Amino acid sequence: MQPRKLYVETMGCQMNVLDSELVIGQLTARSFALSDDVSDADVVLINTCSVRAHAEDKVLSHLGALRRRKQRNPDMIVGVIGCMAERDPGGLVAKMPHIDLICGPGELNKIPAMIDELDETRRRVIALSQSQSRRSTALQRATEYDSVEALDLSRSACIQDHPTQAYVRVQRGCDKFCTFCVVPFTRGPERSRPPEQIVNEARMLVDRGAVEITLLGQTVNSYIHQDSGRAVPFSELLSRLNDIDGLERLRFVTSYPGDFGDDILQAMRDLPKVCEYLHLPVQSGSDAVLGRMRRQYSVGEYVDLVKRAREFVPGITLATDFIVGFCGETDEEFADSLRLVERIRFKNVFVFKYSERPGTVASKRVTDDVPDDVKRQRNIALLRLQERISMEHNRTLIGETPEVLVEGYSKRAVKAQEAEQTRGDEIGHEESSQLVGRTRTDRIVVFPGDIRLTGRSIKVRIKAATALTLHGELVDEDGVARMPGRLSNRVQIGG
Ligand code: SAH
Ligand code: F3S
């Protein structure tokens, strides 16, 4: 029998990227083949994000296009999975009656069974969890969680490819309830996975070729697993993972500035595999705004944490998230965010215009009163300032030779090459290949080299810098620059 074709579209955060990977793994272990062409797919799944209205609008427009496709091919199964499915299943079906499958992020392990049921009954199937589990008893929650865990546990059976970088979930959900945020509603309460499961999964990935593992959690530093009276905190989890032979780099996202103990900073300092990088969303540089967001820390406490991080972990880089135009944000409060960016000198910042989300505390108690063009101007101002700082940072790195883990072809180079090829020019990858990799501090480095360096850690001398990217050349162990041109049949690994 021909395998059925599966097309999966993923929006949103790293957690969704991992969820899609696991769903694909489950289905390809059965009778599905992954397709990158929606037009010949038998099953289309959209893994959705609800964090901002814009992300939801994009899903609706995809679904609109799929409706027309389904009219031509009524047997095609259209599924909406992830946060949007959990947040508003009724609204989705009302707008898009052609949806066949709706599955929240806590129920993704059920998708194979749901597709079987659909094949049999041709009636819409729905699996949701989190909204109920907030009301359920601890015992019920524990059983529900066991079933959710099946998704991560299924990984050993079904991932066929061998990525050099992999995500591992350490925690689900979030208990912080920042007033703007929909995540606690879509992904449910915070639960930490047992450390043995995490370590086993990481070891299996390393055995299959992963050299870098990124641990995922909404507030990853608040990870704590209670096991027969003994608590395993995040720092201990890092230490256990650091012991995995063959693993080179360990990262984790996203950290919450409120629960960040010195034990984690010590672990970052002492464990050689843990990279010198923190994604530490601050959201605002104004205490009044942080209060309205219910972020549970002050600007002073954030600055103090950054200071301690820099003391413990020399050379550490920091990335952050800001929301601009949160309810009632004045010019002066926004200026506090600019001042904080100047003061901390982040490696990079992600800036989001506030988007009111139904069901959140902010949507019920405060008004989304900052006009969109003001949000847009603040967004631009913050990004411009950061661009200047990133540029200044990056220029200081010219002449250095950091260790770079090679990720593959640089996307920009691939795009340029595809454009060339559609114009009929023939360019061999060997001649033109621009590779991309990252330093331990999460800086992006582009340099010419052979694609077979992917997954290797090499030394690259930085020759030029933009705000977002460093450009360099490979160097031999003795520090001499190496021409990549004819490396194709004799890969030399440097550094
Ligand atoms: N702790 C989570 C946060 C998830 S949301 C994590 O894993 O990163 C990611 C970012 O989106 C937040 O840090 C915040 O800056 C932004 N965000 C969340 N809700 C938002 C909203 N309603 N409007 C605009 N930005 C939002
Ligand atoms: Fe959202 Fe705040 Fe949790 S931003 S994911 S509620 S820490």
Image (spheres, grey):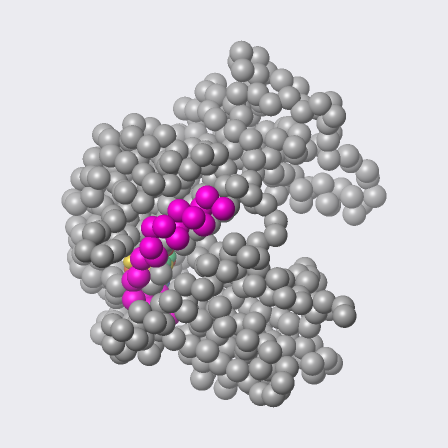
Q: Residue at x 63, y 38 (%)?
A: 409
Say if 236 sits above or below 126 in the image.
above
Of residues 359 and 377, the one drawn nearer to the viewer in this rendering: 359
Question: Looking at the magenta stretch, what is its main secondary structure?
Answer: helix
Residue 25 position, x and y percent, is 57, 59
Residue 473 position, x and y percent, is 58, 23
Can the viewer see residue 485? no
Residue 126 position, x and y percent, is 49, 81
Of residues 378 and 207, the one drawn nearer to the viewer in this rendering: 207
Locate ligand 1 by image quadrant. Answer: bottom left
Q: Residue at x 60, y 65 (%)?
A: 27
Instruction: Tell me where residue 345 sits by quadrant.
Output: top left
Can the viewer see residue 133? yes
Split into 4 quadrants, where in the image is the N terminus? bottom right
Residues in magenta, as a range: 182-204
Residue 232 position, x and y percent, is 25, 49
Q: Is 117 left, or right, of 226 in this rendering?
A: right
Say if 381 sits above or below 66 in the image.
above
Of residues 376 and 196, the one drawn nearer to the viewer in this rendering: 196
Say if the magenta span includes residue 326.
no
Q: Residue at x 55, y 85 (%)?
A: 124
Say if the magenta span includes residue 201.
yes
Q: Residue at x 73, y 45 (%)?
A: 419
Say if 455 sits above or below 55 in the image.
above
